[in-house]
Image: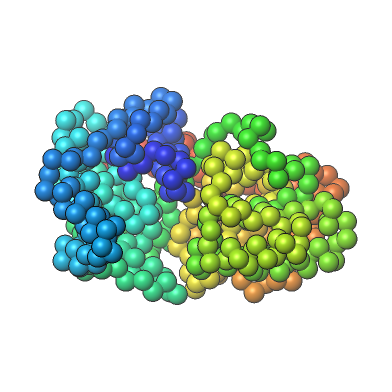
């Protein structure tokens, strides 16, 4: 059960769709109940659109809430969330999904997975309302929940956070397994929810196996150059300045790079958009999109670039595994990783990985650009990530091994 199958709506959806495709590669038959509100087709997956219930009081209340804000700028959302923990729309969506899942018999299935995105856990609420599925429920958790459990300096506390905490605790009690994409995320959440200890699985984001067409590359991307690419939204704590300053220093110290190198930032507008726009006007080797770039183009650029960048939040710990991690590993070119010392990405790369840096390592990052550029100039084909261990870890084969082991442990 998945909230969206539209890979263009978020990085989370891209990762969830890749997971479904890995199930198929592992030999499972997959039915995807989805709430995309439009028909979606995925090869070898039976995709069934769940329609929103419009005949309920919850639907009517959600529309009244929306119209009050649209017409009179009266926002009752904070009161609703504080009182009930979630919006009227959340409850109506969960009930809509519940009506769809009740048409199936649990005895006909080995597993039922709930897959969400962002801070939305509608499919998880649906399964809490469906006890007959609990013994086969794999609850996928992609981020700390609720939001006040994010590591510092994140400091957002959502309305109704106590009810959200109780909601998530119920998930940890009722689900057969709690599935995380990251070992550090599991450890982080375990400090708040003790039930996770005896029922957790780590299944990282999956390789997509998607074919890349050169026709999907945009005009502004010259694949014959030494391209350095950051794909993904620059959230408030993903500061691009260390990358930009190191790239500027690299250009000053490598005159030939001025005609051969380019740095790309792809993603929606952010608090850093104006900074990047000014830098791009001064430095023609820098390109920063001012709006969303379609996934097909982004993925194609990731697979054709010289270097991919993973830029994490300026925090003391980053327990997240970014959705694009698998795409970058799949590209098999060096990954420039900038993040805190305690990071799931750094844990996976290992302490010996040469292109892992912290936020103030400007000179070291510039030197890394030099090293990779010199290697690229000497032999473009030699500039590789060369991490078969990570390829295997993110593969459908490893996914199947984890699931089979979990089944054996449960039966023994």
Residue 298's spot in the image, x, y percent? 59, 44
Horizontal and vertical percent for residue 375?
A: 81, 51
Task: Choose between 348 and 244: the one closer to the eye.
Answer: 244
Kindly identify the residue that appears in the image at 16 percent across and 66 percent down: 83
Q: Position of residue 206 (x, y in %)?
A: 48, 42
Looking at the image, which residue sits at the far top? Answer: 44
Residue at (54% x, 34% y) in the render? 209
| Along the line of sight, the residue nearer the viewer: 20 or 215 | 215
Residue 65: quadrant of the picture: bottom left
- Would you say residue 174 is visible in this rendering? no
How many numbered circles does the render carry? 0
In the foreground, 25 or 244: 244
Query: Looking at the image, which residue is at 25% across and 62% down?
Result: 72
Q: Which quadrant of the view contains residue 98? A: top left
Question: Residue 167, image x and y in percent?
Answer: 20, 59
Q: Quadrant of the C terminus?
A: top left
The answer to which quarter of the image holds residue 150 is bottom left
Q: Is residue 213 left or right of residue 392?
A: right
For residue 289, side relative to residue 394 (left or right)? right
Q: Is residue 5 left or right of residue 234?
A: left
- The one of 242 and 169 positioned closer to us in this rendering: 242
Q: What residue lies at 44% left-to-right and 35% top-to-bottom?
A: 22
For the question of whether residue 17 can be seen, the reply is: yes
Q: Residue at the front extreme?
A: 71
Q: Vertically, is 154 above or below 54?
A: below
């Amino acid at each position: 059960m998945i909230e969206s199958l539209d890979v263009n709506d978020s990085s989370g959806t891209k990762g969830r769709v890749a997971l479904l495709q890995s199930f198929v590669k592992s030999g499972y038959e997959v039915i995807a109940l989805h709430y995309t509100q439009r028909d979606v087709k995925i090869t070898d997956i039976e995709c069934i659109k769940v329609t929103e219930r419009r005949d309920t009081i919850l639907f009517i209340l959600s529309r009244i809430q929306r119209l009050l804000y649209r017409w009179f700028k009266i926002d009752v959302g904070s009161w609703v969330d504080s009182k009930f923990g979630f919006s009227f729309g959340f409850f109506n969506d969960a009930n809509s999904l519940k009506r769809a899942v009740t048409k199936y018999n649990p005895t006909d299935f080995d597993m039922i997975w709930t897959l969400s995105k962002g801070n939305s856990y509608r499919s998880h609420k649906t399964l809490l309302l469906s006890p007959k599925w609990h013994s086969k429920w794999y609850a996928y958790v992609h981020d700390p929940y609720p939001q006040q459990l994010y590591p510092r300096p994140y400091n957002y506390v959502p309305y109704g956070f106590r009810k959200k905490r109780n909601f998530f605790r119920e998930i940890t009690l009722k689900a057969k397994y709690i599935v995380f994409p990251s070992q550090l995320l599991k450890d982080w959440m375990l400090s708040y929810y003790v039930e996770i200890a005896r029922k957790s699985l780590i299944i990282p984001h999956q390789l997509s196996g998607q074919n890349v067409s050169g026709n999907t590359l945009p005009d502004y991307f010259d694949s014959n150059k030494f391209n350095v690419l950051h794909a993904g939204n620059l959230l408030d704590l993903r500061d691009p300045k260390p990358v930009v300053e190191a790239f500027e220093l690299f250009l000053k110290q490598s005159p030939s790079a001025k005609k051969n190198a380019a740095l790309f930032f792809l993603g929606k507008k952010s608090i850093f958009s104006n900074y990047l726009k000014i830098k791009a006007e001064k430095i023609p080797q820098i390109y920063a999109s001012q709006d969303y770039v379609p996934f097909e183009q982004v993925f194609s650029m990731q697979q054709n670039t010289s270097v991919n960048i993973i830029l994490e939040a300026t925090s003391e710990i980053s327990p997240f595994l970014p959705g694009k991690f698998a795409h970058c590993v799949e590209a098999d070119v060096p990954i420039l990783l900038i993040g805190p010392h305690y990071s799931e990405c750094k844990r996976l790369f290992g302490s010996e990985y040469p292109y892992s840096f912290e936020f103030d390592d400007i000179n070291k990052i510039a030197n890394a650009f030099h090293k990779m550029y010199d290697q690229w100039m000497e032999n473009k084909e030699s500039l590789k990530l060369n991490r078969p261990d990570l390829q295997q870890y993110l593969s459908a084969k490893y996914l199947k091994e984890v699931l089979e082991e979990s089944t054996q442990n449960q039966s023994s």
